[in-house]
Every structure is written in structure tokens, then in C-alpha cells.
Amino acid sequence: MNAAQQQNHDPAGHGVPDGFELVHADAALLVLAKPAGLLAVPGKGEDKQDCLSARVQASYPDALVVHRLDMATSGLMLMARSISIQRALGALFERREIHKRYVAVVDGRPTAAPGAGPGGWSLIDLPIVVDWPRRPLRIIDAERGKASQTRWRAVAFDAPTHSTRVELEPVTGRSHQLRVHLQALGHPILGDRLYAPEDVQASAPRLLLHACALGLVHPVSGLPLQFNSPAPF
């Protein structure tokens, strides 16, 4: 399923509401396509109350947050429609039984680690901790950091821009994990205003990071669900 195919799939009959893109809706859960530049949940201050969850809850008052995407990141996001489903989906995340894949464009040409797995997948295994003097930034810290793993593989190198399209699969779910791990690899994401040097920031009008795939077993029906959203860059 992709976003275009699933946009109007809503057994409750709500259609496609204003203010957000509905990918899938059923009695238990919602799948949304978050645009870049929109908060996933409310922030601190009156100027940070417009967000995807608030827009969704205006049409689906029972919608509950399960996970988040960074404001600068676009792509697929899941919400529950009851506390019991929120808990069930949270448990799936904790057991790493919800599959997420991202696509990004990074500076330079990263090379796969020696002994990369089938399909060219490599693993970044670097612990992450909040950089308290500069929060909300995160840093790699071998002593204080929490275990953090990201699978990645290069898809295509673009010589004129000296950049590479990569696919990413977070094994853990730390805040800013993909951005911090790619910076640590020496290949920050284009347009990353937090972790890239100024020239890499200026090379794209937005953060080139998109949650392109979401897969899970439905917590009620037990059927597999797979959603795909092509990157808009």
C-alpha cells in the first residue's frame, strides 16, 4: 500500500480531512503522512500548538500518540484510537516488532562497513545521550550514552552534488538517532540545521529525511499491514 492508494481508506466514513493527509484509518488505528516542518505533537508555547496530532484529533477525537517524528522529518506516523491499542502498539515498538524504514540524502559517499550483511546493509552501533548544555541536541557518548543501533545502506551516488541516497532502518528509537548516527559516520543529512555544517545545511531547502515505510501486525485482526510513502525529494 502507498499513501496515494490508501489516502481515502476510512471505514468510518471521515474521508480526507483538511489539515493532514490520512493514509489509513480503521477502528483501531490511524496512519498519517506528516509533512516536513510540522510538529508531531504540541511543543512548549502558544506558537507551538499547531501539530499533526492536534489536527488529527480535531477529526478523530479518540486519536492517541504512539510515536513521533522530528519536526523537520516527513513521512509515515502511526496513532492509536484507544488506550488499549496505544498500549498494544507501544508494546510492539518496545519489542521492535514495528518495522520502519527511512530514506535520506547524505553528504559525500559513505562506504559499507567490512563484512556488510546481505543487501549491503551495515550497522551503526554508537550510544547516544542528550547534550545537556546544548539540548535538545544529542551526542555520541561511550560512557553515558544509551545503546543505539541503525542499519543503513547506500542506494545511489549523485556525482554533481557529491551526495548519496541511503536507506535507514532504526533498530532502536532514540531521539535524533538517524541524524546523529549519520553525522558520526561523517556523512550528515543534507539540510540538517542541527547536525550538519553550514554548507551541507545550505545544500537543501529542508532536512532530506523521510519515513518511507511502516510495517506491523494489526493489534486486533492479527493481519500484516504494510504502508509505503515515496520520498518527496
Image (cartoon, rainbow, N blue to C red):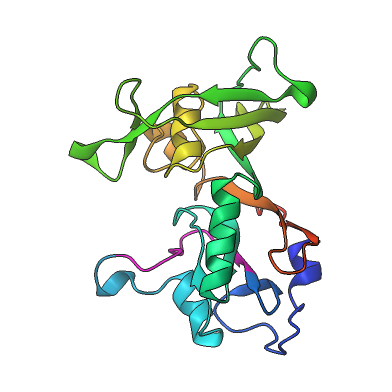
Pick the front one: 212 or 92: 92
Query: Magenta: predominant secondary structure element?
Result: loop
Indicate the quadrant where residue 170 lies: top right
Tell me which corner region of the image, top left, top right, bottom left or bottom right, holds residue 51. Answer: bottom left
Q: Residue at x 41, y 66 (%)?
A: 41
Residue 170 is a magenta residue: no
In the image, 73 versus 198, the foreground residue is: 73
Residue 202 visible to an observer of this rendering: no
Residue at the image position 52 percent from the left and 58 percent from the top: 36
**In the figure, is residue 177 to the left or right of 22?**
left
The answer to whether residue 129 is left or right of residue 173 is left
- The answer to whether 69 is drawn above or below residue 127 in the figure is below
Image height check: is 44 above or below 130? below
Front-most of residues 70 and 83? 83
Q: Position of residue 229 (x, y in %)?
A: 71, 57
Whether residue 22 is visible here, answered yes or no, is yes
Residue projecting furthest to the top: 114
Q: Is residue 30 left or right of residue 223?
A: left
Q: Is residue 144 left or right of residue 40?
A: left
Q: Can you tell which quarter of the image residue 132 is in?
A: top left
Residue 172 % position (x, y): 52, 38
Instruction: Kindly identify the residue that appears in the image at 71 percent across and 88 percent down.
Output: 12
> Magenta residues?
31-43
